[in-house]
Amino acid sequence: MQDEEVLAEFRASKALLEGHFLLSSGRHTARYLQCARVLMNPDRAGRLAVALAAALPRDLRKQITKVVSPAMGGVIIGHEMGRALGVEALFVERPTGTFELRRGFALEPGDKVLMVEDVVTTGLSSREAIKAIEEAGAEVIAAAALVDRTGGTVDLGVPFTALIALNFPTYAPDEVPAELAAIPAIKPGSRAQP
C-alpha cells in the first residue's frame, strides 16, 4: 500500500483532525490522527493490517508466534495483525499505571512477539509495552505501527516498521505558537496526561 493510499483511508474515515491537541507526551499539535476512526471499519482495519504485515521483513514475519499491543490504541490493529499473520493477538493494559498482561493472557518462554501500536509519537508506550512483554518471559523481535510520527528517530531496541510516516509539527508547552494557543486544547488520546 502506497502512502497516498494509506492517507486516503485516513481521509475517508475522517481520522485526520485539525485543531489544538495536547498529546500524551505533553506536546501540542495542530493535527491529530484519530486511529480509532480509521480502524472502526473492519474491512479498512483488515486492509491496513494486511499492508502493515506485508511491510515487515519476510524473515521476521515467519518467526512471529504472537502479537501483543498496548491498550487502548493498539488493541484493534493488534487483533487485525494477529489475523493477518495467523497468530494469536493479546494486549497489555495499565490497571495501576504500568503495563501488564491480564484477562488470562499469557506468554510462554520462546514466544517471539511482534509488538503493534496504532501510532508511535515518542515511543514511550511502545517501550513500556515491550518491557512488560519481556518481563512476562517472551522475546520481542520487532515492533510495528500504522503511523510513525517520530520523524524516523524512535529507537525501540528492536526493528521497527510503520505503514506510513507523518510528521506534524509538535510544540513544547512553552513553544506553542500564538495562533494555536488561542484555540482551547483537546486531549484526544487514551493515555493519562502528564
Image: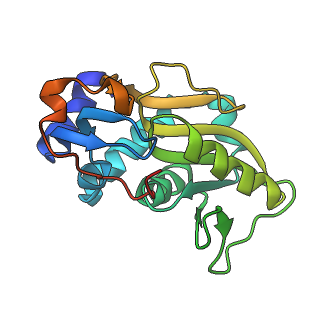
Residue 11, located in which quarter of the rendered image? Answer: top left
Farthest right residue in view: 109
Look at the picture and state if 22 lies above or below 181: below
Q: How is the image coloured?
A: rainbow
- Residue 56 vs residue 26: left or right? right
Front-lying residue, 49 or 128: 128
Q: Residue at x 42, y 43 (%)?
A: 50
User: Can you see residue 189?
Assistant: yes
Q: Residue at x 61, y 54 (%)?
A: 67
Look at the picture and state if 104 lies above or below 172: below
Residue 89: x, y in percent?
57, 61
Front-lying residue, 183 or 127: 183
Residue 53: x, y in percent?
50, 39
Front-lying residue, 63 or 28: 28
- Residue 136 vs residue 93: left or right? right
Residue 81: x, y in percent?
49, 51
Farthest bottom residue in view: 104
Front-lying residue, 32 or 113: 32
Q: How many marks?
A: 0
Farthest front residue in view: 174
Residue 161: x, y in percent?
54, 30
Residue 73, located in which quarter of the rendered image? Answer: bottom left
> Which quadrant would the N terminus be assigned to in this image?
top left
User: Can you see residue 166?
Assistant: no
Look at the picture and state if 66 lies above or below 64: below
- Residue 120 vs residue 63: left or right? left
Q: Residue at x 67, y 73 (%)?
A: 105
Q: Residue at x 32, y 51 (%)?
A: 45
